[in-house]
Image (spheres, helix red, strand yellow):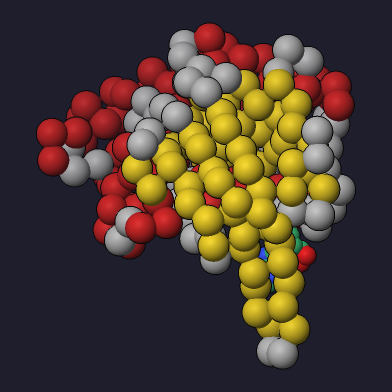
Amino acid sequence: LINGNELWKTYKLDSTEVHALRGLNITVGEGEFVSIMGPSGSGKSTLLNMIGGLDNPTKGDLFIDGKDISRMSEGELTRMRAEKIGFIFQTFNLLPALTVRDNVEFPMRNLNGSKKMNKSSRIKKAEECIEIVGLGDRMDYLPAKLSGGERQRVAVARALVNNPKFILADEPTGNLDSESTENIINLLHEVNQNETTVIMVTHDAETTKNTRIMKIRDGKIAE
Ligand code: ATP
Ligand code: MG
């Protein structure tokens, strides 16, 4: 389902080159919950962004559901992201001027073709996802009025709204206290039980229980 072969990512800054990934191989099967760990700068975010089609490998190929994403056009990538992938970030990345309901509704605007939805169905679906994360009483709040844990729950609802095949979470609990951390990890496991594949970058071993752990070092899988 996800298959990366000999992935290299080289960033060029002026005359220096940074090899963020150095021939990394990765396979993730359908419905798995994978935790990616490793030192700062080892290439974890680079790898996640690549799987999510936000960035391209310099060398190597990366198949998502049998399609080589290093050969997709920008349009195909955008469509793949909208239909298949939910992102969750350490810093939440909610739109500050939009309410909880509108933040969660937002990704559905990117659906096209047979997946396109009218406004009232989008709102209904957004509200269902907000209920799932336990924020039914916060629909009309702006992000600034929410706690960190609540903001991340909104981000989880937003990631779920297009029924993605993959959730990619980059240190989703990095800014949360232990209670909110547990809450978000439990939510991710619930999502995973419903057959969504979850790939999570984390520094916290506590969050990796009942997941397959991959360790990255110097741009390669070490363990
Ligand atoms: P952290 O745990 O600190 O988040 P990470 O494992 O996610 O680290 P990456 O963000 O993937 O690490 O970065 C890997 C390497 O690539 C680092 O040396 C980083 O400085 C470099 N790098 C990442 N993004 C860029 C970029 N856009 N331009 C240049 N270098 C980059
Ligand atoms: Mg990172």
Between 136 and 46, the one nearer to me in the picture = 46
Tell me the residue at 22%/27% (across/down).
Answer: 121
Point out the residue furthest to the left here.
Answer: 114
Q: Is residue 92 visible?
A: no
Tell me the residue at 30%/61% (across/down).
Answer: 73
Point out the residue furthest to the bottom here.
Answer: 15
Tell me the residue at 57%/12% (across/down).
Answer: 190
Quarter of the image where one finds residue 46:
bottom right
Q: Is residue 168 visible?
A: yes
Quarter of the image where one finds residue 171:
top right
What percent of the width, then of the height, locates residue 170?
66, 42
Between 213 and 190, the one nearer to me in the picture = 213
Taking 211 as reference, is 165 left or right? left
Ligand 1 appears in which quadrant? Answer: bottom right
Between 195 and 216, the one nearer to me in the picture = 216
* Vertical side of 125 occupied by 210: above or below: above
* Vertical side of 177 occupied by 51: above or below: below
What percent of the width, then of the height, locates residue 11?
65, 72
Quarter of the image where one finds residue 64:
top left
Can you say which quadrant of the picture contains the C terminus? top right
What percent of the width, then of the height, locates residue 208?
77, 22
What percent of the width, then of the height, locates residue 37?
79, 37
Tell me the residue at 62%/15% (across/down).
Answer: 189
Can you say which quadrant of the picture contains the N terminus? top left
User: How many numbered badges does the structure rendering display?
Assistant: 0
